[in-house]
Image (cartoon, rainbow, N blue to C red):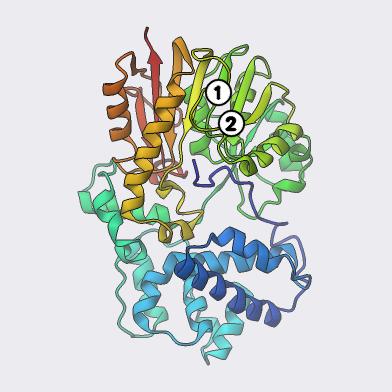
């Protein structure tokens, strides 16, 4: 998967705990310069926002980690809400960034008051709309901020035009329109910070976090998983340093749970990327057996190697993959995971720039790549073994159609029903995890078994 849902959190220390080095005026001006430049180059050149932010912020020694986080959030806010701001013809960058921040955040940052004074607006009348419960509340609040100016607050304007015709109908009991709107609202929200415990007693780790002032919101079904405050400085926690705590979105955790590996088995994670799912497999196997993590991009595997060294597990190995052959003998793995490159629609809440870097034609090309990867990787599954296909997207072209075509071409495989890892009930062998249901990325997962 290329949606970066397992990407280590870029947050520095919590905003409330670490003093700013820069003055608020300096921070407000830096945000204008950097966030608007990042937005411009993402839209013009389809550059990745996280990489641009890293190169822009790294040299700024006058800015502390919480300042970096604020500027990053400003850039992401512009990329999330540009569809509502563009028709207004706003000229001053302070105005665009002020409205973007207020639409995106549940709080009014002190820098907003600096921008308001530049615009000759009363800072006391600013309203943060990031925690608005629905589109109506947010659009009405936006109209009040604009003080009577006409505004088109259509949620579809916040996404590329091709999205509407490539979405399946989300689940739910309301009208089709209301269900689509609920999905769009979920994709516009800032992402939650999910972590999981590995190689340690989860109750002890949660107690350790609580004692350090970080409250874990433990998942009601998955006691090793918890949601933390988005500003939590996970990277400096002792449990993280010891390798007993990993950042991983809940939907990505669901992939490993559906793989359901047993200790002592041999598993191949074909498109391992930064290794989040590989590490989860190693954890579920209690450090016994073998997980082979491969990727066609050797640079991506460097992060997997680093994370594996920090972890308590020694049953994980990494290899660069040519994308054409099974690493080792064919039919030698108890399980194979293909977490394929995709349009990454499911990660748009954490990577809002990604919605502007892909088009409809790319989805067709990606589906061809997914089919080829699934075909090649299937040769690694032993008789009776498991093949899992996952993508952090929702388009039928990349999800159900890929699986249907694969099963037609490979009748020796069949769908393997499994209990839903996050909700009640049993699936038919496929599931689509929706962000509005579980506060996660979106994720399609199919589990198949080689019958002969």
Report whether 331 appears left or right of 238: left
- Secondary structure beneath dot 2 equals strand
Are circles 2 and 1 on residues that touch, CB within 8 Å? yes
**How far across and down, in percent of the image, does residue 182 sit?**
33, 52
Residue lying at the far bottom of the rendered structure: 120
Nearer the N terminus, badge 2 or badge 1? 1
Report whether 174 appears left or right of 415: left
CA neighbours of label 2 inside 10 A, class few (<14), some (14 to 19), many (20+): many
The quadrant the C terminus occupies is top left
- Secondary structure beneath dot 1 equals strand
Q: Give the residue drawn at x 55%, y 85%.
A: 116
Q: Quadrant of residue 172?
A: top left
Query: Is residue 88 shown above or below 45?
Result: below
**How far across and down, in percent of the image, does residue 245 sit?**
69, 36
Q: In the image shown, does 26 or 393 lie closer to the viewer?
A: 393
Q: Give the residue drawn at x 64%, y 79%.
A: 28
Residue lying at the far left of the rendered structure: 175
**How far across and down, in percent of the image, does residue 139 sit?**
35, 70
Q: Give the residue drawn at x 72%, y 41%.
A: 209
Marks 2 and 1, how far apart at CA: 8 Å
Q: Give the residue drawn at x 32%, y 52%.
A: 361
Query: Mark 2 sits on what residue?
Result: 294
CA neighbours of label 1 inside 10 A, class few (<14), some (14 to 19), many (20+): many
Query: Is residue 54 shown above or below 187?
Result: below
Query: Is residue 242 shown above or below 11?
Result: above
Query: Mark 1 sits on what residue?
Result: 268
């Amino acid at each position: 998967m290329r949606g970066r849902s397992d990407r280590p959190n870029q947050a520095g220390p919590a905003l409330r705990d670490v003093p700013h080095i820069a003055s608020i005026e300096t921070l407000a001006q830096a945000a204008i310069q950097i966030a608007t430049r990042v937005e411009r180059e993402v839209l013009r050149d389809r550059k990745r926002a996280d990489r641009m932010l890293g190169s822009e912020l790294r040299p700024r020694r006058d800015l502390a980690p919480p300042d970096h986080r604020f500027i990053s959030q400003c850039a992401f806010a512009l990329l999330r809400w540009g569809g509502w701001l563009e028709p207004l013809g706003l000229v001053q960058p302070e105005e665009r960034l002020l409205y973007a921040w207020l639409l995106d955040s549940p709080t009014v940052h002190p820098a907003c008051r600096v921008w308001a004074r530049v615009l000759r607006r009363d800072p006391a009348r600013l309203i943060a709309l990031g925690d608005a419960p629905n589109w109506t509340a947010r659009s009405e609040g936006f109209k009040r901020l604009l003080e009577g100016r006409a505004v088109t607050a259509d949620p579809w304007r916040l996404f590329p035009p091709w999205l509407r015709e490539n979405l399946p109908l989300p689940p739910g009991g309301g009208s089709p329109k209301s269900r689509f709107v609920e999905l769009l609202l979920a994709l516009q929200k800032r992402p939650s910070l999910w972590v999981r415990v590995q190689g340690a007693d989860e109750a002890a780790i949660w107690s350790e976090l609580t004692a350090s002032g970080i409250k874990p919101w433990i998942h009601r079904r998955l006691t090793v998983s918890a949601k933390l405050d988005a500003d939590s400085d996970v990277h400096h926690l002792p449990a993280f340093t010891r390798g007993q705590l990993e950042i991983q979105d809940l939907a990505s955790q669901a992939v490993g749970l559906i793989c359901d590996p047993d200790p002592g088995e041999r598993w191949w994670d074909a498109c391992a990327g930064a290794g989040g799912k590989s590490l989860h497999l190693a954890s579920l196997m209690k450090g016994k057996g073998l997980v082979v993590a491969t990727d066609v991009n050797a640079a991506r595997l460097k992060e997997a190697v680093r994370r594996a060294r920090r972890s308590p597990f020694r049953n994980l190995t990494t290899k660069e993959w040519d994308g054409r052959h099974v690493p080792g003998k064919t039919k030698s793995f108890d399980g194979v995971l293909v977490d394929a490159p995709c349009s990454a629609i499911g990660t748009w809440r954490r990577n809002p720039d990604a919605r502007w870097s892909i088009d409809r034609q790319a989805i067709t090309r990606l589906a061809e790549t997914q089919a080829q990867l699934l075909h090649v990787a299937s040769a690694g599954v032993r008789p009776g073994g498991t093949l899992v296909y996952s993508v952090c997207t929702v388009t039928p072209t990349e999800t159900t159609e890929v699986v249907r075509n694969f099963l037609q071409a490979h009748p020796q495989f069949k769908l393997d029903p499994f209990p839903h890892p996050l909700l009640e009930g049993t699936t038919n062998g496929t599931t689509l995890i929706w962000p509005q249901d579980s506060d996660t990325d979106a994720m399609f997962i199919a589990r198949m078994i080689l019958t002969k």
